[in-house]
Image (cartoon, grey):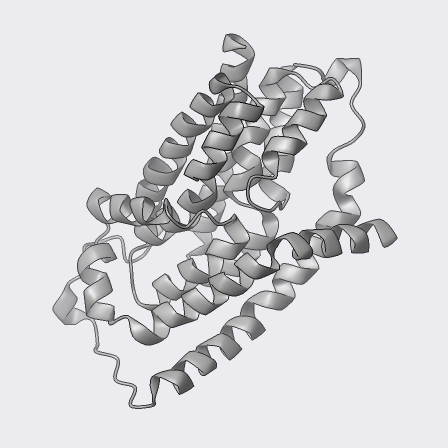
Amino acid sequence: MQIAWNYTLTYFKAVWKAALLGILLGTLVQSLLPSHWLLKLLGKANFKSTAIGGMASIPGMMCSCCAAPIAIGLRKKHVSVGSALAFWIGNPTINPATLIFMAFVLSWEFTLLRLIFGIILTFGVSYLANRFAKESDPVEIDDVPIEVDTRPLWKRWLTGIRDMVIRVIPAYFLAVLLLGALQVWMFPQLGTAAGNSLLAVIFFALMGMLFVIPTAAEIPIIQAFMAAGLGAGPASALLLTLPAISLPSLLMVRRSFPRKVIWFVAASVIVLGIACGITGMIIM
């Protein structure tokens, strides 16, 4: 239990500022931006809306849990599944600062792999996820009811913050605590057999999808694993799955996306992580 608590404290010390910013921005999106304005940009279940959502994520550079409240806020304003997903996934996956850091610390091969598979995940998987949503048909702007809230902005914002905290923080905290307790079993000590096998690629792709880390923490984690004997294949799998999503972030957004979309995204991250790992085994 002490290990789990120490991990939880270390994690939240690293992310609390970004998490707070995510909650503030997510609730501000709900309170300030008009639904019709967002729908014109992000309301269609087409690739254009998905692409705009993904491109908008690039300056954010947040981890999946910190970007989740903003994605929740976007969904409450009726934006499409694909555009909200692209914003959420793109923040940690195609983060330019992380890519530059990665090129210096790991290698350009790892950076190129991350960029290619990150783009596929952010734009391709997010676009395909529209097919699993009930509102996958194009949204008609005039058919969306106009939300009229006559309360002052600050009251709407405080109400949104309260609802977001009640809805998100408990699941976030408990999931991080659980993963802290399970980390020894999720990432066991490496032996020579774990080095660069297909089984190791699959295992680390799955564990990476579940585990939660702060922004860019995958770089020192992968570096430490490789120093302990992990091969380029499993390391490449972690390269994508560690930052993309996590169990806590999935729990945070679970009410904002259809259940089929959540499962599809989780499975897609694992599959693309395995593909990234196999590619890493071949080229490195």
Q: Quadrant of residue 13?
A: bottom right
Residue at left 35%, top 62%?
74
Closer to the camera in the image, 154 or 86: 154
Residue at left 56%, top 57%?
251
Residue 190 placement (x, y as % from top left): 78, 23
Report whether residue 101 is seen.
yes
On screen, residue 31 above or below 168? below
On screen, residue 140 above or below 149? above
Residue 114 placement (x, y as % from top left): 46, 28
Residue at left 25%, top 84%?
148
Residue 68 placement (x, y as % from top left): 48, 57
Q: Quadrant of residue 145?
A: bottom left
Relative horizontal placement of residue 204, taking residue 138 as reference (left or right): right
Report whether residue 1 is seen.
no
Relative horizontal placement of residue 259, taking residue 219 as reference (left or right): left
Task: Find the residue positioned furthest to the right.
Answer: 2
Relative horizontal placement of residue 275, taking residue 213 as reference (left or right): left
Residue 35 placement (x, y as % from top left): 25, 70
